[in-house]
Amino acid sequence: MKILVTNDDGYEAVGIRLLAEKMKKFGSVTIVAPHTHMSGASVSRGGWFQSKAYRHADDLYSVEGTPADAVHFAIFGLDLKPDLVVSGINDGLNIGIDTIYSGTVGAAMEALKARIPAIAFSCDFGHYGPAEEGFDEVLQYVFDHDLLSHNYVLNINFPSKRYLASKGIVVTDIAFRPMHHYYVEGPDGVYKNKRSFLPYEFVLDTDLWAAEHGYTSITPLKLGNRTYSGLTELRKKVGKIE
């Protein structure tokens, strides 16, 4: 199996080196990742017309651009034709509303757009222990249950830093935890974005619940903006469906 490894923390990040090493057990690995830290880029593209890339070794490239740029360049610029794209391991959980902004997830979405199965991996900030310990188990779980798809990304999050190891693996939905957003003005006129979590009752079998209770979560994320429930609802409202 040919495997493309990417991320949004930059090609020299701790998480991508850990991910690449883990994936070598499952196939041949090539790393193509952003040249610098590009967290929060989602699936945005900066290099629509040109991309500056660096070849650091036969199996290691970096691209000046977003995570999606790196994946696009790997597939169409380097003509790698991977069987699987894996993104991460992100330094910080990508659960709930953060999946919308995540460059780690965005890189996986760019792969899915090219009809290549993709997985995004994330762990709590600076807490790689559960990922290092439980990575082989969760990936084998994906393979054993045939979870890879051309229709959705698998978003995998290891448990929060309250836990030294995962209690198990659960398939989850996304939960959206309410937050309070505000800005603090600095003396130089720069505003810093802040947020705080509001009271929330964790919903069973969601990604937030899993992280909070010590489980590794696998959440399917759809490509693009298609919504079957929304389409059905609108058609009912205009009288197209009884």
Image (cartoon, helix red, strand yellow):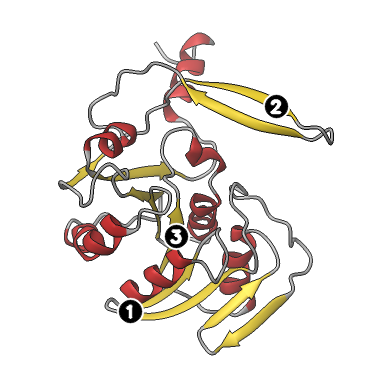
| N-term-proximal mark, 3 vs 2 | 3
Evaluate whether residue 192 shows in this view. Answer: yes
Distance between mark 1 and mark 2 Cα atoms: 45 Å
> Dots 3 and 1: beta carbons under 8 Å?
no
Task: Identify the element where label 3 is drawn.
Answer: strand
Task: Identify the element where label 1 is drawn.
Answer: loop
Q: In this figure, which residue is indicated by the disc labeled 1?
A: 24
Q: Residue at x 49, y 17 (%)?
A: 235
Task: Identify the element where label 2 is drawn.
Answer: strand
Residue 135 lies in what quarter of the image?
A: bottom left
Q: Residues within 10 Å of mark 3 (few under 14, many from 20)?
A: many
Residue 96 lies in what quarter of the image?
A: top left
Q: Amino acid at mark 3?
A: Gly
Q: In this figure, which residue is indicated by the disc labeled 2?
A: 184
Q: In this figure, which residue is indicated by the disc labeled 3?
A: 88
Q: Can you give x and y, in whole percent of width and height, for residue 242 in the image? A: 39, 10
